[in-house]
Image (spheres, rainbow, N blue to C red):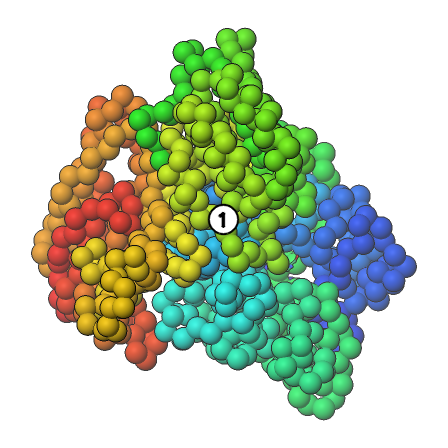
Amino acid sequence: MSHNTYYDKHALARAKDLLADMTLSEKLGQLNQFSGEDGHISDHLRANIQSGNVSSVINEVDASVVNELQRIAVEESRLGIPLLIGRDVIHGFTTVFPIPLGQAATWCEQTIEQGARIAACEAASQGVNWTFAPMIDITRDPRWGRIAESLGEDPFLCARLGRAMVTGFQGTDLQDATSIAACAKHFAGYGYSESGRDYHFANISENELRNTVFPPFKMAADAGVATFMTSFSDLNGVPASGNKWLMDDVLRKEWGFKGFIVSDWASIEDLSVHGLTENNAQSAQLAANAGVDMEMVSRCYAQNIPALLEAGTVRHSDIDAMVTRILYLKFALGLFENPYTDSSKFPERANLEHLEAAKQAAIKSCVLLKNDAHVLPINTRLTNHIAVIGPLADDKYEQLGTWIFDGDERYSITCAEAMRAKVGNNGHIHYAKGLDTSRTFSNEGFQEAIEAAQQSEVVIMVLGEESILSGEAHCRSNIDLPGAQSDLLDEIVALGKPVVLVVMAGRPLTIGAETDKVDAVLYAWHPGTMGGSAIADLLCGDAMPSGKLPVTFPRAVGQIPLYYSQKMSGRPVTQESFVHQNDIPIRAAQTSLGMASNHLDVHFSPLYPFGFGLSYANLQYSEVMLSSQQMSAHEPLNVSVDISNESDFDTDEIVQLYIRDLVASTTRPIKELKGFRRVHVKAKSKVNVSFEITEDLLGFYGQHNTRITEAGKFYVWIATDSASGEYKEFSLVK
Ligand code: NOJ
């Protein structure tokens, strides 16, 4: 942490001093995280804290219980070392913000930082001082349930948004009562779990790790994230929790990370389940030597390290370093001075300001995917009878999404509620659930839904996935709308009214057939507490849709992994070379000539590309202007574009900078995001947006897995999404 703003050399000196006073058993105690007991403190937990065996407690969030735990640690253990109180504060605490994937759709570092700041403040008010976020695993597989918790498919976007989250949680000073320690997770490769199955293995070349998977982690380390968490997954044959190359060689030695590393839940114990070790003793040995400092809930360290030290297979000096890193954070957080939490000194949780921030985040996170014939925005002065239909239209809980242990659904505002408030006495909302849940197959509720639609001038269908269908261990092989939702939609569409589809989901869904049938589609992810208010504002034109997809939407599961930054194949497919199986003559002779890299039964393009999102405004991008055709290390390039807003709507536009390195010593992606900016463009006006391209921005990890830049030609785009715009060419000269 030497170059980060949180580095505190006094904390390090104090940690070292304290270490000198510790017995071996007290040192080993600092490596253990215990599970909380749901507001209860058992004799077992109490005794372990008293004897200095507990460094951290996970999942205890009642301030009085946490204070009592701290009191036992501080007053009844010999050295009085306070506890780290860990919790998965992932996208809010009491006030729930959109799921991280939704937050990523804002492309807005300030919004994300503010969301994490509020979450930290609410969590800290209950004594939590450490969160297990941000999850900055790059993933390109929407089957994987944890894509909901991710910041999308792109390393550049994820790195910046992840850093914003770290800054939000940790604040400007870790000693501040509202700051909590963050945790960059899961190092590394978890998002590449084969077939999108959780806890599955990942085989990722070192080159891919360095170019795609590592950048967000490196940025988090540079930003001073306090801790890292290991991944559950097997990475190239060595599960992360026993992977010395990852933890020690890369993270500590190469990147200079000085914080501590925690295992994932029992992931050290899992090493023998993977078949990497024979027993817990070997697992402890491997993990300790890899550099994993704290063990989450399993007891491999506690039960085996004394014997391993005796046998000399774990070194005392390593244990000292591990303990020092953990104590360092406790000092840096100011826990020795202030171990207790006085909730009354914090702002109320879910106060109006927090709820408003959650609403603004949800507004920015929704992505308008389709708006034919300008069915949106709905003018509620002219359109008085509106149907709001669907299992997610009026469900305070399901709109919150995964990881909401502390969310309070009583604060939620649903779409149906918000639309009722919007039309007031001027009209009527005809609400029907249609289906009991998103997974329901029974069509019992269809008739009521049809009647609601018949009485209305426009229909808003709120479909998608319940919260529990995404998140950890909740992966799907089929990512269509579950249950009979598509059938319900068909019945409603058949009535011939304008239909707006609002999707709440934890992942991209394969909704091509549904989007074809409706007039407009707003993708709302799981939008959190204020989701309904945000959606109603967007649908009625009181707010402007501005989110853009942080992840590619496939047409079919068979296309996965599908992402915008794929490599160029030797036989790239084009519109001209694309062949659909229906176009192949019967008994055509086998040939590979003219054949390109495509599936025969689905178009090669995505349903919606990365970076895509509409607004109600009509924006035009001018040609990209370059300050020169050539650039060098000393002379960066300035690229710019004019964006004009021909419409009557003020809007925010997320302007995206992409490059392509045409020839390199290892093949490079066909496009790579290298910059983005959210700009405000007033109605009937024009803005100029420019980016600087430095040599460093063009760097990549080459054949020897070191970071290099190579002279040569590049393309550059400034565009509204990853599939639009005309490129300009420039060269990097050395
Ligand atoms: C397991 C998850 O993989 C991890 O992300 C989480 O922080 C821990 N459990 C603690 O709940």
Left or right side of 472 for 669: left
Q: Quadrant of the C terminus?
A: bottom left
Splitting the image into 4 quarters, where does residue 561 fall? bottom left
Q: At x 42% / y 60%, what residue is drawn?
A: 558
Q: Residue 716: in sight, yes or no?
A: yes
Q: Which residue is drawn at the image coordinates 49% and 48% (left, top)?
A: 480
Q: Which residue is mark 1?
A: 480
Could you say where residue 75 lies in the image, as x and y percent from the top left? 83, 56
Q: Residues within 10 Å of mark 1 (few under 14, many from 20)?
A: many
6 in relation to 399, above or below: below
Examine the rendering and report whether any part of residue 412 can be seen.
no
Displayed-image quarter of ligand 1 = bottom right
The outermost residue toward the right is: 43
Image coordinates of residue 88 in percent, x first then y, are 63, 52
Q: Residue at x 55, y 28 (%)?
A: 389
Residue 412 horizontal side relative to residue 167, left or right: right
Element under disc 1: loop
From the viewer's side, name the closer residue of 539 and 45: 539
Q: Amino acid at mark 1?
A: Asp
Residue 620 in which image quadrant: top left
Q: Between residues 711 and 479, which one lies in front from this camera angle?
A: 479
Up/down of 361 relative to 601, above or below: above
Please identify the residue farthest to the bottom as the structure is shown. Answer: 311
Q: Is residue 146 above or below residue 645?
A: below
Could you say where residue 103 lies in the image, as x and y percent from the top left? 47, 43
Residue 83 quadrant:
bottom right
